[in-house]
Amino acid sequence: MKVPMPQHPPALETRGVNKWFGANHANRDVSLAVPKGTIHGVIGENGAGKSTIMSIVYGYLPADGGTILVDGRPVAVRSPRDALAAGIGMVHQHFMLVDSFSVLENVLLGAEGGVTLAAGMARARAELTRLARDYGLEVDLDRPVGELPVGAQQRVEILKALYRGADLLILDEPTGVLTPQETDHLFRILRALRGQGKTVVIITHKLREIMELTDNVTVMRRGQVVANVATADTSREALAELMVGRKVLLRVEKAPAMPGPAVLEVSGLRVRDGAGVERVKGVGLTVRAGEIVGIAGVSGNGQSELLEALAGMRPPAGGSVRLRGQELADRPDRFTARGLRALGVGHVPEDRQRVGLVTSFEAQECAILGHQGDPAFNGRLLMDRRALFDRCAAEMDAYDVRPRDPRLPAANFSGGNQQKIVLAREMERNPDLLLVGQPTRGVDIGAIEFIHRRLVALRDQGKAILLVSVELDEIRALSDRILVMFDGRLVGEVAPDEADERRLGLMMAGVAEAA
Amino acid sequence: MAQDAAQGVTGRGFGRPGEVPGWVGYALLPLLNLLAALVLSGLVILVIGENPLDVLALLVTEAVGYPEAIGYTLYYTTSYIFTGLAVAIAFHCGLFNIGGEGQAYLGGLGAGLVGLALTGWPWPVAALGAVVLSALFGAVWGAVPGWLQAKRGSHIVITTIMFNFIAAAIMTYLLVDVLIRPGSQSPETREFDPGVWLPTMDRALGWFGVAIPASPLNLSFLWALACCALFYLFLWRTRWGYEIRTVGRNERAAVYAGISPARNIILAMAISGALAGFVGVNEIMGVQHRILLNFTGGVGFVGIAVALMGRNHPVGIILAALLFGVLAQGGGQVSFEYPTVNRELVMVIQGLVILFAGALENLFKPRVEALFRRRREWRGGGHDGGTAHG
């Protein structure tokens, strides 16, 4: 690790940056300094303002006040073009690549350097080969980007930034879509960049990555910087506490499972997505009462379609699904979202904002989504608003949803509180089988702790839970059995105490089968 | 370890919703938009050489200045409420119903057939029959494009426009070849039996000993107000309205909740068509007392502006319909008085109102909201806290 020389001005510094979104003070006097030649972490919960400050630095958003300095000189960044001119490059969470173009063409896009492409191509090829060699950024320059795995696409984004002369690289949640092996590879590249004197800023909410990779870390909470510390002087627990503002338990405590009879039995299940592509290619699994079965896998390997099919949102293309011994796949009348709910299946969807909630609805209206026909909420003609309100208020109490206002539109709650509204709705129905997708995606650490405890408590009541998550930590913390999904198939089962990251990672990448 | 001094700041103002008072969005901004439209209209009138203040004063006087004028204004308002509600309910289901014109046209056919058939019956029976049949005809004319959208994926905007043309063609055929009064040259039916006419408001109030001057305003105005109340109850207080709104706001969430988008699209379009069809009750049973060509005169399209300006809420729709009623009635009178301010220019003014209220809705919004936000900042503290978000 390098200690920055004190006489050198920081590669990037912000002084008193403010940003408003409507009534939301997203950045409040944000001041931070990134020493040259270091890897700097910016960490915070969702909505803490870490992406906002970096979008301001990269010229996507205009600041409402404050100064940005690059290498000690104030710069006016009004667009990404200005940022690039100042030597700042950014790699986004969602890649900005043209799938049908080759790697070379993608890198050249917007920096063609001449009327004809040939000269620029040759120059770029030479330069990229050098960059690839220096930093371990090997990619096949002539392959179409769409054919590359996600990790390689990310390397293309990094190459793009470096080719444009970036000395400071900002990465926004770079590991969200990567397998553990790809993450390791990325970290090696970032360390190589640091070794060559480049500066790296990484935005993340994953404490482990911060501890493993960074030299210094800036912690943000509610739009403010609450700490700037050297990584060596802090710990995961201390950072978590700074992010949340109170002590948090990072790992849920649970007793061994006591599985009962099988609740859900699936065999040979095949599911097609909206475009008719088969995404689940013959999956068989069993979930028993009183256990949590976790499905690990890199996002996009059919887990989402599997979960949606089991929830009745997507008709299966084949196979058998039995609920408490009752065959459902040949009962299209029962095998619907409505029918399954009536049979005691709860479903916490992966995407709460686009599926699990209607964000413009009041919280109390969201609290009955899927149960709007329930006699408890309906008179002969009109809905019983009192019952709605009371139900939602009770659930908000039980799940500590803040603010406790059933009349507030769901959009005005934070991610964690939105998720609690969904969880409360699905879990308070006392389902025999709970399907849970990404229960803590974009959820604050404090809420994660709460949600995990609730799921374990539900298991201990003897309910069957099928958990789909791309967060390996979460899968390992909660599951009693882990199934690994790759390319639409389950490629193996692992007990959580045997599931070390490396082994799971290889299985998730489709490299190794379980023993 | 934590070096930043700002740590102790309370959560006031951070991410708390509703910092800008609600009346700003519902009252202040529409008024500002209206004002901007009027200023620009004034400039246009100035350019053609008239005094904008005189013209405006005349427009307002002729629309609301004396009882008879108010009657006319409310008569226009009635139809605008119906079509405004029609556009709004489709919009709540995520659909843009451009076909109010055709649905109103066919609704008039339904109402008119009742009027032709029930000679000698008491008027309440005819009124009820006209309401039912105009709703039915309008509903079918709305539901078919809805069905095409839900089942075949044909875009509702295209199909409803096409259905306007089909409705016009059907009406022309019927009035020229089938329903025309025998021996007549003009394409319209015979006049209905006066006994089945929907009573005008002056007649109805006369029963209670209240005298107001005669105007086309008739009892369908009360039905329009009732429809507003029913609209509210249906959409926000029943599970069917809940399902329609869910489909409109988030179709995937609807599928998740076991709500059929197709069913609700067809239902919403049927209700939308029925509401537009009620224009026929006002025009045919209340005013014209016979079926004739082009009696709708664009009310279906004005309904789009009314719904837009009224924020798709019945209260807003009543207010917006009133505004357009004033423009229609006052504007018509202005064009009599000022030869230079012709009907087309009145339409320009209407267009400016629509432009500012609809298309440029967000013109003033960021600035006004920023103003309110700053004001709160300056006042500092002082406000009871909403709870901070976790």
Image (cartoon, coloured by chain):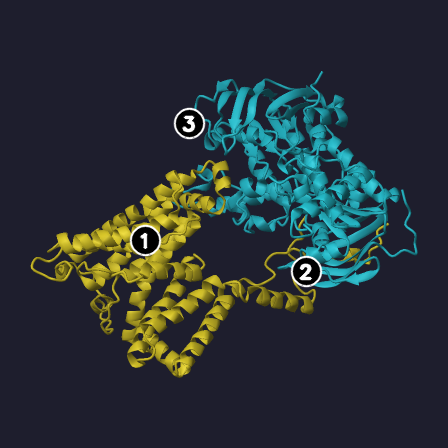
10 Å neighbourhood of mark 2: few (<14), some, or many (≥20)? some
State the SS at label 2.
Answer: loop
Q: Is residue B68 left or right of residue A129?
A: left
**Residue type at mark 3?**
Asp
Residue A484 occupies which quadrant of the picture? top right
State the SS at label 1.
Answer: helix
Which residue, given by chain and number where applicable, does mark 1 sit on?
B275
Which residue, given by chain and number where applicable, does mark 2 sit on?
A62
Q: Is residue B208 left or right of residue A187?
A: left
Pointer 1 and pointer 3: residues touching (CB < 8 Å)? Answer: no
Mark 2 vs mark 3: same chain? yes
**Residue type at mark 2?**
Pro
Q: CA distance from mark 1 to mark 3?
A: 34 Å
Q: Which chain is cyan?
A: A
Mark 1 vs mark 3: same chain? no
Q: CA distance from mark 2 to mark 3?
A: 53 Å
Residue B66 visible: no
Mark 1 vs mark 2: same chain? no
Q: Position of residue B181 (x, y in %)?
A: 10, 58
